[in-house]
Image (cartoon, rainbow, N blue to C red):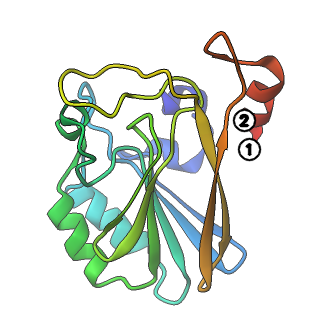
Amino acid sequence: ALRAVFGDQAWSGGSLCCQRIDVGDGTLLLLDTVVPGEEWGEVAAAQLDWLEDACPESRPVLLAQHQPPFAVGIAGLDAIRCRGEQLLAQWLASHAAVEAVLCGHVHRFVSTSFAGRPAIIAPSPAQQVALQDGPLAFSREPGGYLCHDWLPGERLLTHYLPAETENGRLSGHQAGSAASA
């Protein structure tokens, strides 16, 4: 889907849709963990090769990927998390410049640590997955999004912002704001 919309981007021609974005004094590494046709993701040799080539040695880095490489305590989501977490943890052990791991996929805010670094999962701006045992279900919790204020090499400050909704859907005003945030 990304290739169809962003076909003119340099990263869209490779086997992975990864990007390195240098921002001020820091670098964002956007890691493609998608396994075509599957809900779970994976870090394998191709991802590690890309990370090795893309990760700067002398700049602070934020690593972002869709599926989290750790369990979140919701069985249905833990089954479709990013596989290869040990490979990623080993890679992170030798790349101290990576300051945090940012993810999505879970449809609820989660904060933990992974491989000795902060790991933050963004909520969905729409429906949240219920924190419960049993089958996956949506909750009545409001949607939200995160605003990261990153000073590379110093701190990552993350704010949770609830999304305004009308009958469970993003309102027109907030939807435009959230999409541009």
Where does residue 68 sit, x and y in percent of width and height?
A: 33, 50
Where does residue 50 sit, x and y in percent of width and height?
A: 35, 63
Residue plotted at (50% across, 32% down): 3
Residue 120 as seen in the image, left or right of residue 155: left
Task: Give the residue furthest to the bottom.
Answer: 58
At mark 1, the secondary structure is loop
- In terms of depth relative to the viewer, which is nearer, 15 or 174? 174
Where does residue 25 sit, x and y in percent of width and height?
A: 68, 81
Cα separation between marks 1 and 2? 5 Å
Residue 152 as seen in the image, left or right of residue 127: right
Q: Which mark is residue 178?
A: 2
Residue plotted at (76% across, 18% down): 171
Above or below, 156 against 169 in this view is below
Q: Amino acid at mark 2?
A: Ala
Q: Amino acid at mark 1?
A: Ala
Quarter of the figure with the C terminus: top right
Above or below, 63 against 179 in this view is below
Residue 118 as seen in the image, left or right of residue 88: right
The residue that label 1 is drawn on is 181
Residue plotted at (37% across, 47% down): 16
Task: Give the residue furthest to the top.
Answer: 167
Above or below, 30 against 181 in this view is below
- In terms of depth relative to the viewer, which is nearer, 37 or 123? 123
Above or below, 119 against 10 in this view is below
- Callout 1: 10 Å neighbours few (<14), some, many (20+)? few
At mark 2, the secondary structure is helix
Q: How many marks?
A: 2
- Callout 2: 10 Å neighbours few (<14), some, many (20+)? some
Where does residue 61 sit, x and y in percent of width and height?
A: 51, 74
Q: CB of mark 1 within 8 Å of CB of mark 2?
A: yes
